[in-house]
Structure formats: structure tokens, C-alpha cells
Amino acid sequence: MKTFLLLMGMFGCGPQTVSTQPELSKNNGWSHQAPVVTGAGSTALAQPPSETATVIDFNREIRPLLSDRCFRCHGPDSAQRQAGLRLDTKAGLQGNGDRRPIVVPGDANASALFLRITHADPNHRMPPADSTPPLTVRQIGLIEAWIRQGAVWQKHWSFLPPSRPALPAVKKTEWPRNPIDRFILARLESAGLRPSPRADKETLIRRVTFDLTGLPPTMQEIDTFLADESSGAYESVVERLLHSQQYGERMAMQWLDAARYADSHGYSLDRRRVMWPWRDWVIWAYNQNMPFDQFTVAQIAGDLLPDATVAQQIATGFNRNHPIQSEGGVINEEYRVETVVDRVETTASVFLGLTMGCCRCHDHKYEPFSQEDFYRFYAFFNNVPETAHVGNGDRLVDPPALTAPSVLRPIQLTEHRQRIAALEERVAQERTQGAASRPTERVWIDDELPPGSTPIGNGSGAQEFVFVTRPDHPVFSGKRSSRRTSQGRGQHLIQNANPGLRLAADTTLFSYVYLDPQNPPRQIMLQWNSGRSWDHRAYWGGDHIPWGKAGTSSRRRQGPLPETGKWVRLEVKAGDVGLTTGMTITGWAYTQFDGTVYWDKSGVVDRPIDRTEQRLAALKQELQHLTTSQPTVMVMAEMEPPRQTYVLRRGQYDQPGDTPVTAGLPAALGSLSGELPPNRLALARWLVSDTNPLTARVAVNRYWQLHFGNGLVETPEDFGSQGSWPTHPQLLDWLATEFVRRHWNVREMHKLMVMSATYQQSSRTAPPLSKLDPDNRLLARGPRFRLSAEMIRDQALAVSGLLTSQIGGESVRPYQPPGLWDDVVYQNVPRFIQDHGDKLYRRSLYTYWKRSVPPPNFQAFDAPTREACVLKRSTTNTPLAALVLMNDPTFVEASRKLAERVLREGGQGTATRLEMAFRLTTGRRPIPVEAKTLAVALRELSETFRLDATAAEQFLSVGEAPAAHDLEPRELATYAALVNSLLQLDESVTRR
């Protein structure tokens, strides 16, 4: 196995290594630890600037220093302000008539600020030694130079309206492909750097396909692009991707993090909720290329629009994605306040890039936002008629809510009908080639109960199963039967069987029953749990048990009571009680009204079906559900009369102030136009108005982050004083103004970015560049970063041929380790029940997201819990990530199916098969040394499985996808193991 291990090391097994190079200071670009690239693009040496140096920019170089070192005690927070001194305003620095200025423009030696930061006595020097790190020589020099240059004060950069800059002049005029490149190249030339060559075509199509769809390109798409030598070849690829169905799914991935989307309510019980119709709306909106201003207004206040459509109301689910309490005994108002606070924090972060949550309990310590500003903003969201509590039940909602079909239903119905037609044709062809399999009887309950099942009794005589034996009691099969006597309704049942009883084709359910002639019942009933519901019932005799709806599959009469004093076989067609092929029974109940009843041997008679028939049955079931389903989703609404809002002392729900506040903006951001009442619609209109300097900047920064790994502002959630200074301020403003000029066209902005020469550069780096700009902030090379958790899984499914392309719909539950939910859920909360069939292979976007236990394979790759808004995922490198790729059933199964594909489609030669496997997983052909290493590794793996056939069988048994009986198992295992290692390569999980 030495060569196999060499293969892993050669290509870099596991996730991308996190850089350990020194980083630029988050706030100001200056560091006393190492030379860094400054705002001007030159290497910053540890010495103060001379008086003839470039003019000091207050926002870029002085404000961050004051914010870090001074604002905590001399900033916006009036309660914590020391000595009445304020350094976050011009009046505080330069005097306002009431007190002497602490900065004298042009004269550092007359400025108290400079004198205190350079004071020889540590007891008088600012900032205090025990409060923050001391100022460095360079930082002191910056402040001195700024004062000598006139101490020009500026409002914080992000609170100023974006101004459209002229395109900068550049020397290398042939390089730019669009205006973005002019800004990037000008900065590079000023730093003495050159852009990298264009990436090769294989790299380029893989990069842009992942960025715009979240999936790898197919080999056919790669070959078509390689063969197209026209000047518009790359643009044609971009246009195809932007108009694909997968584009909306890709864009939604990022938005779900921002909107803290989950499929559970959170908190201790964390029960299931139905918010996926809102997720469908997001996908639909992106695929419709809904302008971002409309996208924003719909989600903040779609319900308040004139003649609001169902889609616009569903869109407001954005602000119902927060956690909701369901535990008994809590104080509803306490948690209602938390939901409103969550809306404030999320809306401010997502659309404004501001940390509004920091002034819930007191004035903001770094931004010009008071606690009253917070509650004025809070008032926009405080008028929803909600309780912020749901009961301990499944799919419960906290009104207001809307019952309506998904906006994607027309597309889903068309997809399903097309897939059903194709599978029906395939099944018909298979049946003409051979006789259908014969029905067989499968006994599920007899002397023993199914594994994992829980026996329960209720009603009259509420004991569990009471087993009796011959000769004193009748027994039909085996050694014992179960007996029950009741007055009125009585029942004994099993539930939570694992594994359950999966139904095949043409299923008939049966049970043997014996009615005591001395004490006959008036009604008997059989009932089944499909894993989701007990609403599958059949009964004989009178109608005394009122469960379900008479005449439907939830209460279907089968006939009179059977004859007493003898064993009678009861049979029920599965379809009569709403059970269809592919469903799994996890519970079976025996119910009676009065009398003494014996029950024995129970199970099903059905015809085994192949995978094609299983898929067909599942699709027909899904189509029926789609046609009739009307999910209920939580939305926003307004109360009449409006709820009063007060400043809450220390942010406590039960400590309101004395005077109500009205809805409004933080004073530093201006005021509403007055054309609308101060409600959510007025706020939404302002968010995308010309008077708001933030939303367009924040949006284009996130788009940039999607394509380049980092935004132009590296703190997408914080455009305030504690956030990062933009690496390219003029480019950010140009993009923001261009976005508005293009009528907030999201698709056009993505195209603009990926069509730039900056984006199309090679990501390879050389030592001089890696030393000068280790984090690629100047963008002298293409971006390189690890794929997201969802993309890594989706890539494995796509290249293996397992991926299901269905768009939208309910969340699914693919493989995960058993028992993960058990430690965090109560006894009466449903356990994890894995899905089967095509649901196992849906895109990761649709994976069920439980807040207390997020999908474990996603967490290994830094996916958030979705308990709060996240605008940028962290990237860590741990052994867990590699272990997921090696052992998770999804990846092991995908390796097997990919190996099957390679053996069937890769030709007869080893070299062509290995090339195909490598191309599918990395997007390129292997170079000779790599091809040689792959061949040697394959031989060693082949020898391993030749000597251990059992290991091959075990490896190939992982996953529910059917085995390939036409392929030799040891050869298949050999290729599957090799492919599994290829899926782990750094190059496979990295977007280059």
C-alpha cells in the first residue's frame, strides 16, 4: 500500500490547508509584527511616515485606531464614557465651544490627544496599559502626521453615499476585460505587481461552474468548451450556467445561511417545522432573476404590498426563520422579545452590514447608535400578531401563517410527469423481457416483536402485549398469541421499529384474529404507522372507534366481524389504507371495542420489485402528494391596533421604559421619507433607496465574496468602525453604483464579476507574490478556496451519477450516523428516520437541518448551526473532514457507483479508465507522473482485495444503491477504493 499512500500525499489528501502567513490587521492595515501591504499598496515598514508622505486618510488609518484603542471609554456609549470626552465625533475631537479641542489641526504638540499618547509617565499615557495593547511607533506616527496635515475629519466611510469614481488609468491597457480590471490593475501596478496569466480552460470551466451552480462541470461540458476556440466560448458557458435551474439553487445556499433557515424550531425540543416553501421561493426568485430591490422588499414587507400575492406573502418567511420556543412553562413574552431582537440583528446584518445587536442593552460602544435607536428599529418588527411559542407537536406553526402550494409546484409537476413517463416505458420494456416476480409472504409479528420496536398498551386494560400459550388459549402460529380483554376501546401496539417493514409491489397486509365466542367484541381494527402518521386504518364490525375520517384511508370499513371461535385471516389491500410501494411501516396496532380478542401472525404479502419499479412507485406517490399538498408556512403580518414599543432597560423583556418609541431609523442613517407610515414597508423601501448608503455595497460585497473567497470588505457582517477597511474602496463604490444603475440585476452582477480578467487569472502563486500578498488581497492571482460542505457532497453525487435533479420541495434525510438525535431530544420527540430511494441523493441544499443537531458531515466542513445569521463561514482543517470523505456512507457509496461508471464507460484499458476517474473528480487530465502513480496504486489495491475477498464485499455493501452484479466484485472494489481516494484529494475539494 506504499504507493497508495504516496498517491494520497502526492495530491494533498484532505481539505485545503489554512494559511499560516501573517494577516493584515483587521481594522487598519498596519501591524508592528511583520511588513504588510498597506492601503497604498506598498510594503509598510515599522517607522512613522514623514511629513511629506502621502496624505493620511482619516477613515482608513486614524478612525480604526481610535475605534480599537479609545472608543470603548471615549465613544458613543454615554453610560461608559469617561471624563465626558468623546473621540468618535468631530466636535469631540476639535471642540464645540463648550470645551477645549483635544486636537489642534496642524499642531501636534498643542494637541492633547498627541501629548497623552506620547506621555512619558505610564500613569498618564493613553490608552491605559491595562486596557488595550499599547500604540506602536508607526501608529503614533500616523496620528502625528494626520494632525500636522490638518486633522481632516470624515464621517465613517460606509455612512457616506457611494460615489461613482472614474476608471483609473493603467499601463497594461490590453489586460482589462471590463471596468473591474481597471481598478484591480491600477492597484497592482502601484504595488509593483503584475497580474497572473489566464487560467487554463479546464480550470476555468470548473471554477465558474461551481461558482454559478454549486456543481462540477460534466466531462461533455468540459470537452465542448475545450473544442470551442471562438472568442465567445467562455461567455457562452457563463450564460448557460446563469440561466440553468441549478443557478437558483446555488444562490440560495448562501442566502439560507444569512436567513438562518432550518427545518426545526430550535431550543430544547427542536421539533419539526415547515419553512421549505420559503426556501422554494428563494430558489424561484433567483431563477426568475428578481431584481434585488424587489427581492428585499418582498422578504421584509411582502405582506404589506398593495394586493400582495401569495408568493410575496411567502417571501416574508425570511423573518420567521428564527428559533421558536415549544417547551411548556416558559414565559411567552420573554421569547417573543427574543424573536423581535433576532429580526433586528438579522435585518441589520444582512442588508446593512451593521452590528445593531450591540446596542440592545446600552448605547453602541463603537458606532453612533444609541439604545433608543435600537428600539426604534425594533419597533418595525414588534407589531406581528405572534405568541413566539408552538406546542410540542410536529409541524406546528406560530401564527400568522399561510396555507398555499409552493411557487415551484408547476415546475415540480412537470419534472415528475416526465420522469414517471420515462420510468414507465423502462418498466414496460423490462417486463417484456421476463415474467414478473411472484408474490411472497413476509411475517413481521409472531412469537417475537420486530427488532427495535416499542410495545405500548392504552385504553381499557392498558397493559402492553399479553402473550398466552396452549392448551389454555388458542394459538395459530408458533408457540403463543397475544390476548386482550377490554370494556370499551382497548389497544396494544408496537412503534418505532427499526428497521421497519418496507412495502414492495401489490402489497396485502394480513393478521390472524380469533374472537372469543363467550365475549365477542363489537368492533376490531388494524392500524399502521408509516413512519410519519398512524392515519392508515381498517376495521370490521360496528363503527365505535371514531379515529380518522370515515370512508377514507384513515378509517376504511372492510366488512362485518369475522366468525367467532375460529382463527380468521384478515387481509387489507395496502392502497385501501393509503400505504403505497416504497413506504416503510414502523408501527402496527391491534384495536378492539369490548370483548376478548386473540391476535397472531401478522405481516404482508407482496411482490418483490426492482429498483426501477421502486423509483416509479415513489415518484407516483410524490406526484400525488405534490398535486394535493398545501403546506402551511409561517409569514409576517401586522397587528391592529399596533403594539406599543418601549426601550427595554438592560434589554430585559420585563423592564420597559416609561415612554413609548416610534418606529424609525438610527439617527446616524437619516430618516424615512414620510411618504409611507413608519412600518416594515417604509423600512424596506428605504433599504433600497438612494438615501441608504449601505445596502448596495453590502450586497455586491457578498457577491464578490462568493467568487473570490473574501469580500472587498472582509467582514461582510460589519461595515462599521470595527469592520475591515475595503481592500479596493473605489471598486466597491463603483460596483454598488453599477448595481443600482443596472436596476439591481443580480444575474448581470455575477456575470460582470466572472467575465473579468481578474476572476479568470490562474490561482498558482510564486514565492515573491506569496510573500508580498499571502492572502491575495490585491488579487494578483485567481482565487483558491475549499468548496463548501454542500458542494463537496453534491460533487460526489454528481460525478457518480447518483444525484437527483429534482428542484424544491420538502427537506430530506440522507445517511447520518445512528443515535445522533437521541442525546438531544426528549422521549416524545420523533427520532431521526432516514429516507430512502431518490431522497438519499438530492442536492445538499434540501437536507433536513435540525438546529440542535445539524447534518454531521456538513459540520465537519464548517457549516453553521443556523441558530443565527451567518454571512461568512469559517474554514478549518481537521482530521474529521478527511474521515468524513473516507467513511461517510454517501462518499463510500458514491465511490462504488463512480467505479461502476468508470468500468462501464472508461473503455477496456486501465489507462483510459484511470484518466476518466481522475477527470471526473478533478476536472482535468492527469499528467504523466500522476497517471503512473495512479496505475501503481491500482495494482496494489487489486492485490489487497485479491487476498481479502471479504473486505471487497464489505466495501461494496455500503449504501442502498443496488449492486452491479455484472461486474467482478474484487475489480469493482479496487476501482472504488481508488476513486474514494481521488474524492479526498485537495484538488477535488478545492475550487481553484
Image (spheres, rainbow, N blue to C red):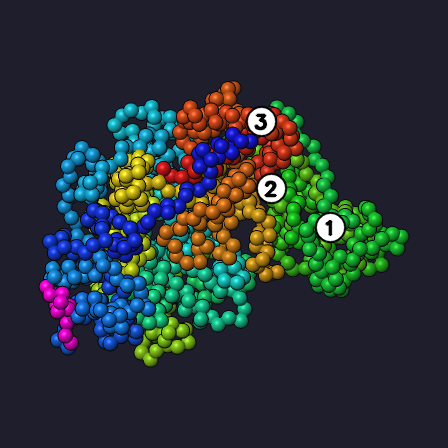
Q: CA distance from mark 2 to mark 1?
A: 22 Å
Tell me which corner region of the image, top left, top right, bottom left or bottom right, holds residue 870.
bottom left
Residue 119 placement, left or right of 518: left
Residue 40 placement, left or right of 521: left
Among all residues in the image, which is located at the extreme front? 120
Question: Which residue has dot 2 on it?
Answer: 582
Examine the rendering and report whether any part of residue 856 can be seen.
Answer: yes
Examine the rendering and report whether any part of residue 741 can be seen.
Answer: no
Count neighbours of disc 3 (C-alpha within 10 A) and say few if under 14, some if 14 to 19, many if 20 or more: many
Count neighbours of disc 1 (C-alpha within 10 A) and say few if under 14, some if 14 to 19, many if 20 or more: some
Mark 3 or mark 2, earlier in chain: 2
Magenta residue span: 99-111
Secondary structure mostly seen in magenta is loop
* Pair 1/3: label in front: 3
Above or below, comparing residue 374 to residue 695 in the picture: below
Q: Amino acid at mark 2?
A: Gly
Residue 241 placement, left or right of 232: right
Among all residues in the image, which is located at the extreme top? 908
Where is residue 911? Give x, y as percent: 48, 22
Q: Amino acid at mark 3?
A: Ser
The residue drawn where x is 27% and y is 32% is: 197
Mark 2 or mark 1, earlier in chain: 1
Nearest the camera: 625 or 730? 730
Residue 891 placement, left or right of 186: right
